[in-house]
Image (tube, rainbow, N blue to C red):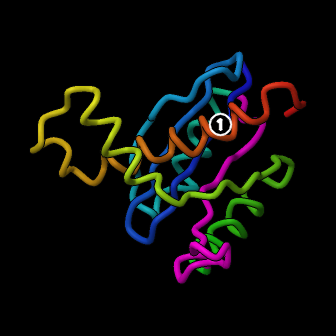
Amino acid sequence: MDRIIGIDYGRKRVGVAVSDPLRIFASALDTVPAAKIIDYIKNYAQKEAVVRFVVGYPVNMDNTPSEAASDVDRFLKQLAKAFPGVPVSLEDERFTSVLAHRAMIEGGMKAKDRRDKMSVDKISAAIILQGWLDRNKKEEV
């Protein structure tokens, strides 16, 4: 079944989320070391058809690219080279970490577990992807 992958890219770690086949909801999938993310996605794409990537893009409050945007830009080039036929959508990632922490609290996660940055990264990826899915329900992927 066709899947959309959501990505919260960071220099050290990358949060990964995936849509359900009907593209209704996003689920946190994994947190991967940044150096291994392309191989991870290639491996995933051998099992499931990936039809789009939604990548969190870091912007400042004035909508200008943040300092971390150059890292994401480099990753986007690698992604386009590895998956030339798969479209990429950029999604504003402001406040996703805050929303991820809130979701973990509301989900009853213990304080010790909430400090695990790997959990925050994959939940942030799910929030990024869910935002895109919610806005694009009627559009063709």
Q: Give SS at disc 1.
A: helix
Would you place residue 62 above or below residue 7 in this image? below
Q: How many marks?
A: 1
Magenta stretch in the rendered image: 49-69
What residue appears at the point 56 percent right and 29 percent down from the top-left corner?
26
Around disc 1, counting alpha carbons within 10 Å, would you say few (fewer than 14), some (14 to 19), or many (20 or more)? some
- Residue 57, by quadrant, is bottom right
Tell me: residue 114, above or below residue 77: above
Q: Quick one: quadrant of the C terminus?
A: top right
The residue under the point 64% across, 77% down is: 65
Outermost residue on the right side: it is 140
**In this rendering, would 70 be left or right of 117?**
right
Answer whether residue 89 is magenta in the image.
no
**Horizontal relation, residue 141 to residue 43: left or right:** right
Q: Position of residue 129 (x, y in %)?
A: 61, 40
The quarter of the image holding the N terminus is: top right
Q: Residue 53 lies in magenta, yes or no?
A: yes
Q: x, y percentage for residue 80? A: 77, 61
Pick the residue in front: 65 or 141.
Answer: 65
- Percent across and percent down for residue 18 are 57, 33
* Residue that mark 1 sits on: 45
